[in-house]
Image (cartoon, rainbow, N blue to C red):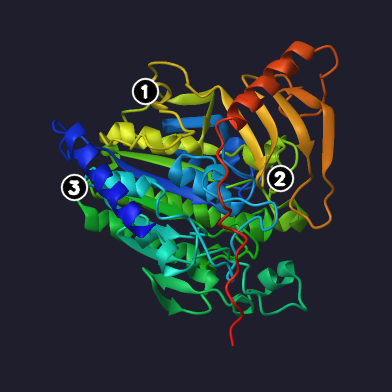
Amino acid sequence: MILRSLFTYAAIALFAALDSVNATAADQPNFVVIFCDDLGYGDLSTFGHPTIKTPHIDKMAAEGQKWTNFYVAACVCTPSRAGLLTGRYPIRNGMCSDKRRVLFPDSARGLPTSEITIAKALKGAGYETAAVGKWHLGHLPEFLPTSHGFDSYFGIPYSNDMNRIERKVSQQQLAEDENFKAYDVPLLRDTEEVERPADQRTITKRYTEEAVQKIEEFGDKPFFIYLAHSLPHIPLFRGPDFKDTSTAGIYGDVIEEIDWSVGQVREALEKNGVAENTLVVFTSDNGPWLSFNTHGGSAGLLREGKGSTWEGGMREPTVMYWPGKLKTGIVHDMGATLDLLPTFAKLAGATLPDDRVYDGHDLSPVLFGTGKSPRENLFYYHGATLFAVRKGQHKAHFKTKISYVRGAKLEEHDPPLLYHLGHDPREKFDIAEGNDAVIADLKKAAEAHKATIKPVETQLDERLPPAK
């Protein structure tokens, strides 16, 4: 497997070199992806929150593009992140499961090294790369960012609520008490542990400082920075400068600190003279964790949240910013994190090997106002099972399950539930009756997609042997 990965990596570099003979570092744009954890569609003021203030994100949206139909590859952390970095539905590489929905500290595997990540593809085109923040694609050395094309890594390798020690107090109360020691999560520098437990009261600030430092270090070299915040995933922590500053309480404090972070990144790009050559993408991995009430965010008018394939679980608030380059405005076309890999590769002059199926599309026509999004379909997976499909404005639910809570019951639908997302983004009015032709078309799209899936072994179920 490792040998195969090395050959693939070498092939990427060769293809990129041949494909970009005329490209120079000055031609190649930089890329910054700011990826939140459990941020809801309705949690930003530019997406309609009435009390949380996000002026930096709002400004980027006003000067860039606000995408209202932008999706992730899964409704929970691990598979969603795998989809973003590889441009492939997680069902294709085993990064999903119906048993263990995400990776845990006792997980034995992670993202296969044979996968082509954004970082690996861009490295082949001469890019500097850095991962900062939450990883959650395998915590063992062979699965960490430095094994997937990133030159450096600084962050917590999985969710910030894992290795929980304190079980007698609720997570909401632990957040209110600022008890970061209740979670024995490590902070890593590359593959080495530098702090345990990580002091999460300063984690957003330190992630931001790391990203800013990387921008300064890279200078005029083309770069890709993946800044994946650990928040607002429960437990909630915020720095002292943001404590009790938001009208929306502790959750608002957390979001407003993330907004500050976005402002710091933008300021660093401007100070270092690279803002006009940098595409910034801001989005989240899945919807809000609704079972934590006011500590879990809001999906706005969308239905449900994290862990569900309703719109609130997988449609994310998304902003793209590239001063002087993007056609500014609100984008109603469909897009997805799956599309970032092919889009970045196209803009960077990198060539992707053709030995695998990609599920992403190049969004350049929408970015530059030369055409519509090539994305026509979206397939909504719950674990390793296809629950729903969207084609155009119609969405069919074959199976449904409410948000990420224990004991949630699976419901199967025959005929499937049918919604027109243009008329009814809330998915409130089932229009299946009398629309047999639409349902047949959506079923046909689902079957065509499933025919492209080859069985692979899940990477999520195997556990490490118990410590002696």
Name the image quarter holding the C terminus: bottom right
Q: Secondary structure at mark 1?
A: helix
Q: Secondary structure at mark 2?
A: loop
In the image, is residue 278 above or below residue 332? Answer: below
Are discs 2 and 3 less than 8 Å apart at CB? no
- The residue nearer to you, when weighing 424 against 22, is 22
In the image, is residue 19 above or below residue 305? Answer: above
Question: Which residue is found at the position 23% from the left and 37% from the top?
Answer: 15
Mark 3 = which residue? Answer: 220
Name the image quarter holding the N terminus: bottom left
Mark 2 = which residue? Answer: 305
* Amino acid type, mark 3: Asp
- Residue 150's image quarter? bottom left
Residue 454 in percent (x, y) is at 55, 39
In the image, is residue 305 above or below residue 336? Answer: below
Is 311 positioned to the left or the right of 196 in the image? right
Residue 257 in percent (x, y) is at 52, 57
Label 3 CA crowd tier, 10 Å (few <14, some 14–19, many 20+): some
- Residue 356's image quarter? top left
Mark 1 = which residue? Answer: 368
Q: Earlier in the sequence, mark 1 or mark 2?
A: 2
Question: Which residue is found at the position 34% from the left and 49% from the top?
Answer: 119
Q: Say whether residue 24 is visible.
A: yes
Label 1 CA crowd tier, 10 Å (few <14, some 14–19, many 20+): few
Furthest toward the bottom, the residue is: 468
For the residues labelled 1 and 2, the Cα–Cα distance comes to: 32 Å
Residue 21 in percent (x, y) is at 14, 33
Is 39 positioned to the left or the right of 416 in the image? left
Q: Earlier in the sequence, mark 2 or mark 3?
A: 3
Q: Secondary structure at mark 3?
A: loop
Q: Say whether residue 49 is visible.
A: no
Q: Earlier in the sequence, mark 3 or mark 1?
A: 3
